[in-house]
Every structure is written in structure tokens, then in C-alpha cells.
């Protein structure tokens, strides 16, 4: 049989994963899909920590590297910032080979940079941090939202909500790291818009997690994740993993 097989018919195209996992270059994609208004304002981007223009930055902002996960520094008062310590941490994150020992090699191809963005102000009465709305999507169809809030160094309150915003605790495996939030997160007033955004961004991808924030009823983009927890989502129940597996068409 000499017929050429189109393997992309059977397997997901991962050629865009590196660009979309890059917290700087993904901004191009958001604009390409006509959603530039959901981007958090960019204050600066640098290749070296020595080039960071701290004097030009506002009193509060966020610093992050573009090539990893969780590499974020929140600055609420610049006058109290230890620049030497901050630069040392950013350099460690930049040099880290995130993905080298996991199923996430697309991160290794990201040219490391440092970016500064505006700090989104948390106004929630039930959370000490912004609520991270993680919308799981399958080729343009949102399935459900996993919320993370009250984030601390090694813990967070979490809860699943299905597409109708029903609290689904049976979809989680709670522990001291990912605690049971108990269904405290109310349905956002802009929920329909969030689902519309998630649908637009996820179209064409068999599965992707679209992370969003909401401030004053306005939706902001967080990131797109194709390999959540490197595929080891043992904090999700078998029930919901099987549901999402059935929805993934590759």
C-alpha cells in the first residue's frame, strides 16, 4: 500500500503548542483570533534581567518568565522590592529546563524572556487571590470550568463547575494541596462571554485548557495549557477524566 497516510488525521497537530505556551508570543495568537481586548496590558519585555527598566514601571505590576509554569512575581509596592533578589529568581526561572523530564517538550523550544504586565486587582470577598477560571475545551466546545482561588505557596481552594455552573465536587480528588472550595465561587455575570472567548481560542485543538480572569465584569486572558500537570491530573476523579477523554477526538 503506497498511499501516503495523513497522520494529522489521527493525531493532534502540536506545531502551535510552543508558540501558545509562550506567555509572550501567545499574545499574537489572541490578537489573530480577534480578542486583543482581553489581553492584560503589557508593560515591558526583556531578554536579560539586567535590562529590566524598573524605573519606568508603575508602583504595582507583575513580573513573569514566558517559558515555564508558576514563574510569577507579584509586586504590590515597588518601593519595597528587592531588585537583586528578584533578578536572581527570574534568572533561575529563565535557565530552568521546564518540560525536560515531563511530557511537555514544547516548553523547551521557547526563547526565554521576562515580561511585565499590569497587576489585576482582586476584589473578591471570598478569595484572597484572583479566581483562576480554567475552562476545559474540546475543539471549540467548552466542557466545564475548574476554579482555583485563595492561592498560597502550596495550596489553593478548588472546585469544578459544569457548563450550567453546577458545583461538581465528585469530579475532584481533594487533598491538602487542592482543597475543597465547597462551591463558593458564584457564576460570573460575564459567564456567557467567557464561554464565547474559550470557544474561539480553543477551536481547532482537540483539547486545551483556557485560563481566564475576571475583574469588574471584564474578562482577561491568562494562558492556554495543552498538557495540564504533564498529563498527571490525579486531583481529578476518574469520572471526569473519562468524560474528557471521550470528548478528545484525535
Image: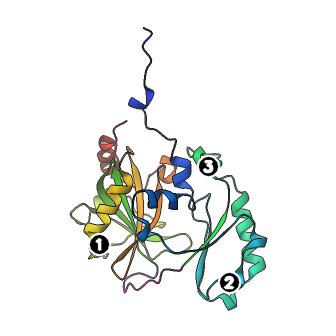
From what the image shows, is residue 6 above or below residue 28?
above
Which residue corresponds to mark 3? 99
Q: Is residue 94 left or right of residue 43?
A: right
Q: Is residue 125 magenta?
A: yes
Label 2 sits on a secondary structure element that is helix
Position in image of residue 249 (x %, y %): 33, 38
The quarter of the picture where the N terminus appears is top left
Q: Residue at x 37, y 45 (%)?
A: 204
- Between the residue at mark 2 and the residue at mark 3, the CA separation in whole angstroms equals 33 Å
Q: Position of residue 18 (x, y in %)?
A: 56, 49
Q: Which residues are magenta?
A: 119-128
- Answer with mark 1 or mark 2, whichever residue precedes in sequence: 2
Question: Foreground: 167 or 206?
Answer: 206
Secondary structure of residue under mark 1: loop
Would you say the magenta stretch is mainly helix, strand or loop? loop
Please provide percent x and percent y for residue 26.
Answer: 52, 58
Determine crowd level at label 2: few under 14, some 14-19, many 20+ residues with C-alpha closer than 10 A: few
Q: Nearer the viewer, residue 179 or 85?
A: 85
Query: Which mark, by number, is residue 23?
Result: none
| Label 3 CA crowd tier, 10 Å (few <14, some 14–19, many 20+) | some
Residue 183 — which label? 1
Residue 51 on the magenta segment:
no
- Say which residue appears at 36% left-offset and 72% top-offset: 181
Instruction: Indicate the quadrant where residue 250 lies.
Output: top left
Q: Residue at 78% of width from left, 78% of height from top?
A: 84
Q: Which residue is tagged 2?
A: 56
Amino acid at each position: 500500500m503506497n498511499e501516503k497516510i495523513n497522520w494529522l488525521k489521527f493525531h493532534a497537530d502540536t506545531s502551535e503548542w510552543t508558540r501558545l505556551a509562550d506567555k509572550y508570543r501567545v499574545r499574537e495568537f489572541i490578537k489573530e483570533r480577534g480578542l486583543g481586548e482581553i489581553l492584560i496590558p503589557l508593560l515591558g519585555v526583556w531578554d536579560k534581567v539586567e535590562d529590566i527598566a524598573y524605573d519606568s514601571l508603575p508602583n504595582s505590576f507583575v513580573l513573569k518568565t514566558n517559558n515555564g509554569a508558576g514563574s510569577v512575581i507579584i509586586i504590590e509596592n515597588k518601593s519595597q522590592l528587592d531588585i537583586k533578589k528578584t533578578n536572581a529568581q527570574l534568572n533561575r526561572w529563565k535557565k530552568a529546563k521546564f518540560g525536560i523530564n515531563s511530557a511537555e517538550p514544547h516548553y523547551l523550544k521557547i526563547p526565554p524572556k521576562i515580561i511585565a504586565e499590569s497587576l489585576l486587582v482582586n476584589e473578591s470577598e471570598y478569595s484572597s487571590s484572583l479566581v483562576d477560571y480554567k475552562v476545559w475545551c474540546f475543539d471549540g466546545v467548552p466542557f466545564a470550568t475548574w476554579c482555583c482561588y485563595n492561592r498560597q505557596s502550596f495550596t489553593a481552594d478548588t472546585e469544578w463547575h459544569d457548563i450550567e455552573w453546577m458545583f461538581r465536587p465528585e469530579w475532584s480528588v481533594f487533598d491538602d494541596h487542592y482543597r475543597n472550595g465547597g462551591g463558593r465561587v458564584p457564576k460570573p455575570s460575564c459567564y456567557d462571554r467567557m464561554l464565547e472567548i474559550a470557544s474561539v481560542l480553543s477551536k481547532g485543538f482537540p483539547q486545551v485548557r483556557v485560563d481566564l480572569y475576571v475583574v469588574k465584569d471584564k474578562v482577561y486572558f491568562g494562558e492556554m495549557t495543552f498538557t495540564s500537570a504533564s498529563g498527571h491530573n490525579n486531583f481529578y476523579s476518574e469520572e471526569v477524566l473519562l468524560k474528557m477523554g471521550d470528548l478528545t477526538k484525535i
